[in-house]
Structure formats: C-alpha cells, structure tokens
Amino acid sequence: MRTILNELRIIVNRAYARPVLVVSRFRVPESEAVEFRAGLERAHAALAERPGYVAGWIGRNLDDQTLWTLVTTWENVGGYRRALSSYDVKLHAVPLLSRAIDEPSAFEVVEPGGDLNVQETRSLG
C-alpha cells in the first residue's frame, strides 16, 4: 500500500533523476589564457572523476577569445551537487569555478514533449 510519504518520494526522485547540463562561462584576459586553460583542464578532470559525471567539454568563443566555457553533463542534479562537495573538486575546481560569470549555470535537459521542471516552495514539515 502506498503512503503519502512514498508518493512524495516518487515525485522527488523523478525530479532529481533528470539529466543536468552545467554551463559555466568565464571572461579571461588574453594574457591569462594559457594559465587559465591549464586550470580549466584540471577542474574538468576533477569533475570527470566524480560519480554521476557523463561528459564534458572546454570551449573558447570563436569571435571573442576572452570568453571561455566549461560544459558538463550529469546523470542528475544530485550527482552534480555531490561532486561540488568532494575534496578534490573543492581543491582543483571550485577556485576556478568561482571566476565564472555570475549567472545561473545548471539546466535540466528538456526532452521533446516532456514535462518541464516547476519551481515550487518545498515544505520542511
């Protein structure tokens, strides 16, 4: 027999089971490009070692070479959040990620015809 608590767990698990796309953009002076790239590669490697990581890429804008990006995909939001709390990621990625342009970076993957995530206030009681 399903209880209300079990129903809520099912709903929450569906929401957190969706793939997540993380796009971090950086504005970096040309004079720092070589050093920044090395740091970005270290950050990406640290993230790639974490459970839940699916794939990732480093990119540099074709027209504005001071604009860089780190794009990663994750099995779900929980995997991404747990990755950010790991020691190696805090050591090798978080300092660099703190240089990212201040904008939202985590996105749900939207499937054709699929339901969209709805922002709701969650009750603690």
Image (cartoon, helix red, strand yellow):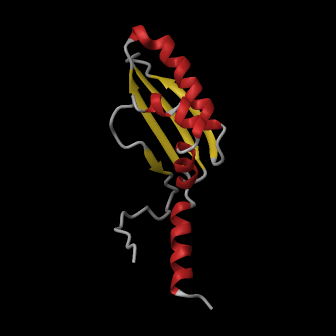
The percent position of residue 79, horizontal first and vertical second, equals 58, 51
Give whichever of 1, 94 is nearer the camera: 94
The percent position of residue 60, horizontal first and vertical second, equals 47, 21
Residue 105: quarter of image? top left
* Left or right, 90 with reference to 55: left
Q: Which residue is drawn at 46% across and 38% down?
A: 23
Q: Quadrant of the N terminus?
A: bottom right
Q: Residue at x 41, y 32 (%)?
A: 98
Q: Is residue 29 above or below residue 113?
A: above
Q: How many marks?
A: 0
Residue 38: quarter of image? top right
The percent position of residue 65, horizontal first and vertical second, equals 41, 16
Q: Is residue 95 above or below residue 113?
A: above
Q: Which residue is drawn at 57% across and 44% down?
A: 83
* Left or right, 56 with reference to 33: right
The percent position of residue 5, horizontal first and vertical second, equals 52, 82
Q: Quadrant of the C terminus?
A: bottom left
